[in-house]
Amino acid sequence: MSTAQNLIVENDDAPHSFRRHPSRGEVMAEICAQLDAFRADDAQVIRGATVISKDLSIDSLAVMDMIMELEDRFDVSIPMNTVAEIHTVDELADTILKLAARR
C-alpha cells in the first residue's frame, strides 16, 4: 500500500503530464505557443484554420519537432500516417484530443 502512495506522490509534481484529459483550450494554447515563433509577422494571428505548413514560416523538420513536443506534453503518440494528414491547427488539436481520450 505504501508503494502505491509513493507512486502517486512521485507523479504529482510531473509538470507536463496530464492525468486527466486535456481541454481543447489547453491543447490549442500549447499548439499556438509552439507555433508562435513561426508567425510571418507580429500582426499574424494563429487560429484553428491556420494551415501550419502554408501560413507559417515553418519547415517539415520544425513541424516534426513540434509534434514530438506536443506528444510528450499530452502523453500521446501520433502515428506518422496521421501526421501526414494534419494540415490545420484545428486538425492537430482534434487529433491530440482524440488520442488523449483513448488513454
Image (cartoon, rainbow, N blue to C red):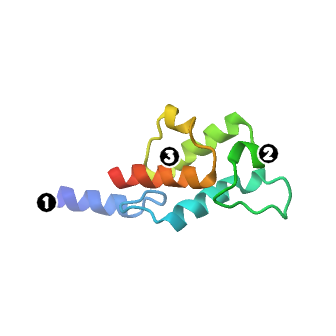
| Mark 2 lies on residue | 57
Res. 103 in view: no
Q: Is residue 64 above or below residue 75?
A: above
Distance from the alpha carbon under mark 2 to that under mark 1: 52 Å
Q: Nearer the viewer, residue 92 or 2?
A: 92
Q: Earlier in the sequence, mark 1 or mark 3?
A: 1
- Residue at 19%, 56% in the rendered image: 3
Three-letter code for the amino acid on which mark 3 is drawn? Glu
Local crowd size for mark 1, using a 10 Å CA cut-off: few (<14), some (14–19), many (≥20)? few
* Most distant residue in the left direction: 1
Label number found at residue 1: 1
- Residue at 48%, 57% in the rendered image: 16
Q: Earlier in the sequence, mark 2 or mark 3?
A: 2
- Residue at 54%, 55% in the rendered image: 93
Percent position (x, y) of residue 68? 55, 42
Secondary structure of residue under mark 1: loop
Q: Is residue 96 above or below residue 27?
A: above
Res. 35 in view: yes
Q: Nearer the viewer, mark 2 or mark 1?
A: 2
Three-letter code for the amino acid on which mark 2 is drawn? Ser
| Mark 3 lies on residue | 71
